[in-house]
């Protein structure tokens, strides 16, 4: 693979590339330095090289549906626009039957239901087991990707079970994987300020490690653009890859920025579009042992997602169908994509769409026409 000039001409990026070619790892300190001091085109070119070396032009997506179980939550994370108190007019808690009825119209098309929610004060393991068992009995082919680490902790505590017992039981009921939400920034001093009461960084990692040990694959996430520093972001990357070294069950890393809202977290240092792309590129460079990096379209929108899949990301979420958490926070991303439309978005970004299943075990190449007309600009001198 030829080395782009934007890398060759930059000693920092050339040195990072050499380290990676030699099988080395970019340290947290070097990551911070690279983040601050490299030009964006070179940084994204390096991340893209890594992505291309693993997957060529392929970009993966799946046909999924987001269903939120409840928006009632005993916590009040400062960035969260989704949670409601029990008496709020818009508070809801789906029964198993209601949950299944949300899936019904999409059955035969989607391969995964993505289900997270708040920490309902009255829900224990019985509620979740009912939801998963009914879903599997009606829709046996659908993979259930559900529960943030703090939901697992809440269910365990409400049910007087250990984390391991909780996950074993939920797996028997039909839970297939964890989506990885709630990592925020894995630095406790930041968590104490933005999501007081949530699990500690070490608990997030431990819950995922237990899931991996039980054969439950998980994703991992990062919410950035709140109050964290660049060093905190590098610490986050480092903790995830160290965890992956020992438990090896993270499938995909999903970074997303905090969306501006004056009423929540007014001191947030919001991430610009350039910063979003810089974070995605750095994640591909730093997370050498996590297979996939996702452009989370629900949060960053189609335009940035299109740049992201040329800047290190190899996966894009998804057909989605319905989404509340990011849309309550201000996202306007289109939720009603079908497979062909998503494939066209990927093609129009000069990448090749590959439909995958929920756990990256089945793949299918998708043919579609790219969106929009090709714009042929005149070439000077011709
Ligand atoms: S982020 Fe999750 S745990 Fe925090 S308030 Fe919102 S729903 Fe509750």
Image (spheres, helix red, strand yellow):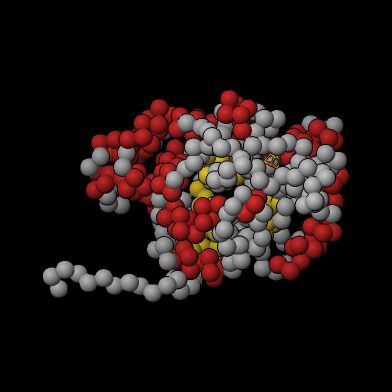
Residue 267, visible in the rendered structure: yes
- List the single residue furthest toward the front: 262
Which residue appears at 69% of the width and 47% of the height?
Answer: 82
Q: Position of residue 183 (x, y in %)?
A: 61, 37
Q: Position of residue 166 (x, y in %)?
A: 79, 38
- List the single residue furthest toward the top: 189
Residue 172, visible in the rendered structure: no
Say above or below: 362 vs 231. below
Q: Nearer the viewer, residue 380 or 150?
A: 380
Q: Is residue 29 left or right of residue 90?
A: left
Q: Toward which corner of the image does residue 349 lie, by quadrant?
A: bottom left
Say above or below: 124 vs 325. above
- List the single residue furthest toward the left: 381
Q: Where is the C terminus found, in terms of image quarters?
A: bottom left
Which residue appears at 36% of the width and 35% of the height?
Answer: 36
In which of the image's four quarters is ligand 1 placed?
top right
Q: Position of residue 123 (x, y in %)?
A: 84, 42
Q: Nearer the viewer, residue 370 or 193?
A: 193
Q: Toward which corner of the image does residue 94 lie, by quadrant?
A: bottom right
Q: Toward which corner of the image does residue 58 lie, by quadrant?
A: bottom left
Q: Position of residue 86 (x, y in %)?
A: 82, 44
Q: Is residue 379 left or right of residue 315?
A: left
């Amino acid at each position: 693979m030829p080395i782009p000039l934007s890398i060759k001409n930059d000693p920092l990026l050339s040195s990072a590339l050499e380290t990676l070619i030699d099988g080395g790892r970019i340290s947290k300190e070097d990551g911070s330095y690279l983040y601050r001091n490299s030009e964006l085109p070179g940084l994204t070119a390096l991340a893209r090289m890594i992505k291309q070396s693993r997957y060529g032009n392929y970009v993966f997506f799946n046909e999924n549906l987001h269903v939120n179980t409840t928006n009632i939550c005993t916590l009040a994370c400062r960035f969260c626009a989704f949670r409601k108190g029990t008496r709020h007019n818009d508070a809801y808690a789906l029964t198993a039957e209601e949950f299944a009825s949300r899936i019904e119209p999409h059955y035969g098309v989607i391969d995964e239901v993505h289900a997270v929610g708040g920490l309902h004060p009255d829900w224990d393991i019985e509620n979740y087991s009912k939801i998963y068992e009914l879903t599997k009995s009606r829709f046996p082919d659908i993979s259930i990707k559900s529960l943030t680490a703090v939901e697992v902790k809440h269910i365990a505590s409400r049910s007087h079970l250990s984390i391991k017992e909780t996950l074993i039981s939920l797996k028997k009921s039909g839970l297939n994987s964890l989506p990885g939400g709630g990592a925020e920034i894995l630095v406790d001093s930041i968590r104490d300020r933005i999501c007081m009461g949530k699990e500690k960084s070490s608990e997030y990692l431990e819950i995922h490690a237990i899931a991996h040990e039980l054969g439950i694959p998980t994703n991992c996430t990062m919410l950035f653009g709140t109050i964290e520093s660049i060093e905190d972001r590098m610490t986050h990357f480092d903790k995830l890859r160290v965890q992956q070294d020992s438990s090896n069950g993270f499938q995909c890393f999903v970074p997303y920025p905090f969306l501006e809202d004056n009423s929540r977290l007014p001191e947030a240092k919001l991430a610009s579009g350039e910063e979003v792309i810089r974070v995605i590129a750095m994640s591909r460079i730093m997370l050498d042992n996590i297979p996939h990096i996702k452009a989370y379209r629900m949060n960053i929108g189609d335009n940035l997602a299109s740049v992201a899949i040329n800047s290190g990301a190899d996966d894009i979420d998804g057909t989605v169908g319905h989404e509340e958490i990011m849309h309550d926070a201000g996202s306007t991303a289109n939720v009603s994509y079908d497979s062909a439309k998503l494939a066209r978005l990927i093609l129009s970004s000069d990448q090749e769409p590959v439909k995958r299943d929920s756990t990256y075990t089945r793949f299918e190449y998708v043919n579609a026409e790219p969106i929009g007309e090709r714009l042929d600009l005149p070439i000077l001198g011709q």
